Every structure is written in C-alpha cells, then in structure tokens.
Image (cartoon, rainbow, N blue to C red):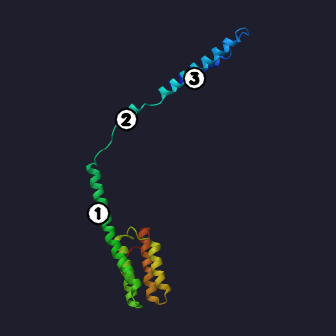
Amino acid sequence: MKLTSALVVASLASASAFAPISSQTSTSNTALEASSRREWLSSAATIAALGIPTLASAASRPTYLVDPTEEFKINEAKAMEFKRQQLLIKKDFATVLDRLTAEPNDEEALVKDLAELKLLVAKTGGLPLGIKKEDVFKIIRAKKAKGFWPTAVEYAYQKLISEISFQQSPNLEKDMGSPY
C-alpha cells in the first residue's frame, strides 16, 4: 500500500516532466517547476513519514515475562545441583592428580593413583566439567617425563586412556565394554 502510493506520486511527477513547455512563459514556468518540485518533495517526505512506525506503537509492545516461571525455577535448581555434583567430582579428580604429581617415585602408588583415576572416569561416565582429556594427559605425561615410569605404571596409564576414550565415545556393539 505504501509502496503503491509512492510509485503513483513518483509517476505523476515524472509524467509532468514530459509536458510541452512554451518558450513564451519560460520565466514563470521555471518558478512553477521549482514549486512543484518542492511540493513533490514535501509529499514524498510525508509519505515516508507515514511509513515509519511511531514511538507510540513501539511503546505499546507487549511485555513477555516479568518474573521467572515455576518451570524455569525448577530447571535452574536442577542445573545448580548438576554443577555442584560436577564440582565435587572435579575436586576428587584434582585430588588424585595432585597426589599423582606430588608423590615420590613409587611404582605401587603411581599404579594405584592411575587405577583410581580410571575408576573415577568409569564411575562418573567420563571427565567432569572443567577437566579436559588433554589436560589430564599433559599432567600425567609431565610426571612420565621426569624419568621414573615402570612398565606396570605404563599399563595403568594405557588403561586410563582407553577408559576415557570409551566413556567419551562408547561403542556398545563390540564386546569391549567398560569393566565398571
């Protein structure tokens, strides 16, 4: 509707440009052309102004929600409980990783810590939020690079790697399952 009225006004203005001009009334015709241009511009500005939404219509938009709904509150409570559980699990992982890196070179203690990490991974279904697989591997590899890394510790480390891989992408069609 707005576009149609603008096209009509534009076509009327362009149609008057093709009207024959007499040479005798050239001075008065120039003044007439200028006034008709001004009128056309003012009418075009009026049409454009009508097409723009006013502030009153913008202020009358509906307000959706002021207070959270009960469903939202329940979901937020669930999310907070999940975060609390993840923080507790993360604390357990951090404790074992700290113990692994701080212990002196003792084969049994290293195997025990790696087995405990494997058990935590299996029990929790993977790594907790905030602990990445690469970060765990970096910490363990740093301990490995310090020198003392017997074969039994390497076996425990490889079992941990396979458990993390299984928990992140379980393939239940094969017979290889989590021993947990």
Front residue of this view, candidates 175 and 34: 34
Q: Nearer the viewer, mark 3 or mark 1?
A: 3
- Tell me the amino acid under the disc marked 3: Leu
- Tell me the amino acid under the disc marked 1: Glu
Q: Is residue 171 visible?
A: no
Residue that numbered label 1 is attached to: 81
Q: Is residue 97 visible?
A: yes
Residue that numbered label 3 is attached to: 41
Residue 127: x and y in percent read: 39, 71
Element at label 2 = helix
- Mark 2 touching mark 1, by CB under 8 A? no
- Tell me the amino acid under the disc marked 2: Ala
Q: Which residue is most to the right?
A: 23
Q: Classify 78 as above or below 147.
A: above
Q: Residue at x 48, y 81 (%)?
A: 141
Residue 172: x and y in percent read: 41, 68
Element at label 3 = helix
Q: Which residue is most to the top?
A: 24
Mark closer to the chain start, 3 or 1: 3
Q: Residues within 10 Å of mark 2 (few under 14, many from 20)?
A: few
What's the CA distance linking mark 3 and mark 1?
Answer: 65 Å
Residue 26: x and y in percent read: 71, 12
Q: Residues within 10 Å of mark 3 (few under 14, many from 20)?
A: some
